[in-house]
Image: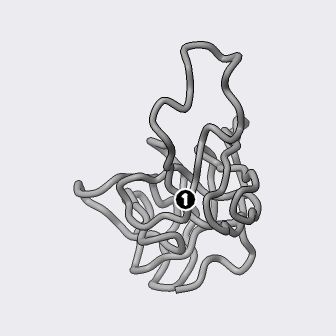
């Protein structure tokens, strides 16, 4: 299953496109669904110690640790923007119905979820398998 060939596409952001910068621990492409990773105790109690490299991201392997959708591309060790809110166009790994909750199937596509797994958003449009759906990102 291929990621959206147009990469990260956000036709609307609700006026507040929450984008977080993280360090890629492997190559990440625009539009990839990413998960968080990192070392224990990377941040202290104060903001003065926080740096972009304190958050680590990698291509999603499952729906349980979804962090968001990559806005740009990054090689391993480089920083990448991760959209954690807004509306994006994502590839579907199965038929998705507007109004249903969705989660990731790896880094490349989404599927409908009822209760199991981590909900990453809600489909706003219908799409068939390997089609594209407009998704409102939530719970990230």
Residue in front for this viewpoint, 29 or 118 = 29
Check the image and name the residue furthest to the top: 46
Asked if residue 87 is positioned above or below residue 106 in the image, the reply reads above
Q: Please state the horizontal and vertical placement of residue 5, each as a whole percent of the image.
A: 71, 80
Label 1: few (<14), some (14–19) or many (≥20) C-alpha neighbours in 10 Å = many
Q: Is residue 136 above or below residue 4?
A: above
For disc 1, the marked residue is 34
Q: On the image, which quarter does residue 88 sit in?
A: bottom right
Q: Residue at x 60, y 41 (%)?
A: 55
| Residue appearing at x 55%, y 70% in the figure | 133
Tell me: 69 left or right of 126: right
The reply, left or right, for residue 79 in relation to residue 65 is right
The quarter of the picture where residue 30 lies is bottom right
Q: Residue at x 62, y 65 (%)?
A: 26
Residue drawn at (40%, 69%), measured in percent from left and top?
Answer: 97
SS at badge 1 = strand
Q: Is residue 1 left or right of residue 104?
A: right
* Picture quadrant of residue 106: bottom left
Q: Nearer the viewer, residue 106 or 56?
A: 56
Q: How is the image coloured?
A: one colour
* Rendered view: 49 above or below 128: above
The x and y percentages for residue 76 are: 69, 63
Give the image location of residue 72, x and y in percent.
76, 60
The picture places residue 31, in percent across and down from the top left corner, at 66, 66
């Amino acid at each position: 299953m291929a990621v959206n060939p147009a990469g990260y596409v956000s036709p609307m952001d609700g006026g507040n496109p929450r984008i977080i910068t993280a360090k890629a621990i492997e190559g990440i492409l625009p539009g990839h669904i990413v998960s968080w990773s990192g070392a224990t105790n990377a941040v202290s109690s104060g903001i003065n110690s926080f740096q972009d490299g304190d958050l680590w991201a990698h291509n999603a392997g499952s729906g349980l640790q979804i962090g968001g959708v990559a806005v740009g591309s990054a090689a391993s060790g480089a920083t990448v923007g991760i959209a954690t809110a807004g509306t994006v166009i994502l590839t579907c790994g199965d038929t998705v119905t507007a109004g249903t909750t969705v989660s990731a199937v790896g880094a490349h596509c989404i599927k409908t979820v009822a209760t199991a797994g981590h909900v990453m958003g809600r489909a706003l449009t219908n799409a068939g398998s390997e089609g594209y759906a407009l998704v409102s990102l939530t719970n990230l």
